[in-house]
Image (cartoon, helix red, strand yellow):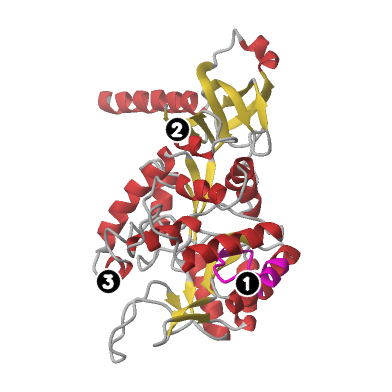
Amino acid sequence: MRYRSQLLLLGVLFFHLSIGFSQKTYLLKPARVFDGIATHEGWWVLVQGEKIVRVGPSTDFKNLSNTSAETIDLKGCTLLPGLIEGHSHLFLHPYNETPWDDQVLREARSLRTARATLHAKLTLKAGFTTVRDLGTEGAEFDDVGLKQAINQGIIPGPRMLIATKALIATGSYAPKGFSPDIEVPQGAEEADGHDKLIQAVRRQIGKGADVVKIYADYRWGLMGEARPTFLVDEIKLIVETARSSGRPTIAHAGSTEGMRRAIMGGCETLEHGDAGTPEIFKLMQEKGVALCPTLAAGDAVSQYRGWKKGVEPEPERIKNKRLTFKQALDAGVIICFGGDVGVFAHGDNAREMEMMVEYGMKPLEVLKSATSINARVFHLAQLGQIQPSFLADLVAVEGRPDEQISDVRKVKMVMKNGIIFKE
């Protein structure tokens, strides 16, 4: 009886402590605040629990001197909304460590999941409090458990929007190069035609998918050239089925025709867009379809194949990517920040931001892309800006990333849902 009373007392104590912890109040004093839209000198931010409750000039906070808020001085720092990674694969690691085929066919899923927990931690420490993770690449629905472990506080990591297995047309994806007599496990789920596509979409959503990802084209057949996969009517069916449950559909699309089909089929974002043309980008702008250019992935793969960046001339693939990215900017296409991280190292997400500037965007526009624009495109209503009532996902970095984008690497503090993970 005495033992039970002690347990009850401990339970009550833990309950009250947990309430106090969840309602902790912070007064953040950076040199400036980038609120997701513009930079404001001398602004401070008050956080209570998981929400931002006040934002504005430091003079507006004079009456807080006697509150219980814990003050955090962030001298010389810029406070940003938590950064949003738009194209991640937490179950992959750099291809110069292990080729993609070997990761899918030779690495145990338990090993890949263990590694993914580290990737999640590195991503969060780098200031990325949300990721859109676009396919487990052969790790089945293991992203569902990873997301749950983060949400339950078992492991540290970013908020996850997950695509689970992703959808491919039969025979179009990879691994490939084996005898046609051998059935090889694929890096995504094969489905075609009316009934099977509806079933596959519903199955993935039922298992936990927040977004449906399709491969609108891929390097398939003996020639290995990127060609369209799904028909426009098939894409429309996928989009309609996903949308009926409140989920968006996005498309891997690198070829001109694959991009056109994905746009006309109703996909909300296109990933890569390597063979885009002025006409295609004009169509994207007219339809409000966003581009996630994944510049860093192509740059990394080219270096893995032997290109000595900064020493040798740029390969044609890189020259073309510069051109198409500029064409997309000139056309006014919505640009989502997303690097296809996993092809290169997790935690090095800022590599894509630096390349976006290198390829023609202004640092301030890149910051918008990684915060308020991604939040809007990904339907994250309480993220991407520093405003009262928004979730307290905040990152402090030394310097002025709105002027020198590489300053996003100088992370001093990371807060997610009002909880500090790095200080």
Foreground: 316 or 241?
316
47 left or right of 263?
left
> Quadrant location of residue 389?
top right
Instruction: Report if residue 22 is visible in the image.
Output: yes
**Amino acid tagged 3:** Leu
Given the image, on which type of amino acid does mark 1 rest?
Val
**Gap between marks 3 and 2, in whole Å?**
37 Å
Q: Position of residue 280 (x, y in %)?
A: 67, 71
Q: Give the image location of residue 316, x and y in percent.
A: 48, 68
* Picture residue at 64% right of the left edge, 71% below the top: 277
Residue at 54% x, 46% y is 84
In what quadrant of the picture does the C terminus appear?
top left
Circle 3 or circle 2, nearest the eye: 2
Q: Is residue 271 magenta?
A: yes
Secondary structure type for disc 2:
loop
Q: CA distance from mark 2 to mark 1?
A: 40 Å
Q: Which residues are magenta?
A: 265-282
Q: Nearer the viewer, mark 1 or mark 3?
A: 3
Q: Is residue 322 above or below residue 280?
A: above
In the picture, residue 40 is in which quadrant?
Answer: top right
Disc number at residue 239? 1
Q: Give the Cα distance between marks 1 and 3.
A: 30 Å
In reply to whether residue 237 is colored magenta, the answer given is no
Q: Residues within 10 Å of mark 3 (few under 14, many from 20)?
A: some
> Quick check: 52 above or below 347?
above
Say which amino acid is labelled 2: Lys
Would you name the residue on which mark 3 appears?
Answer: 105
Q: Nearer the viewer, mark 2 or mark 1?
A: 2
**Which residue, given by chain and number where applicable, does mark 2 sit on?**
410
Instruction: Residue 383: tell me if it is visible.
Output: no
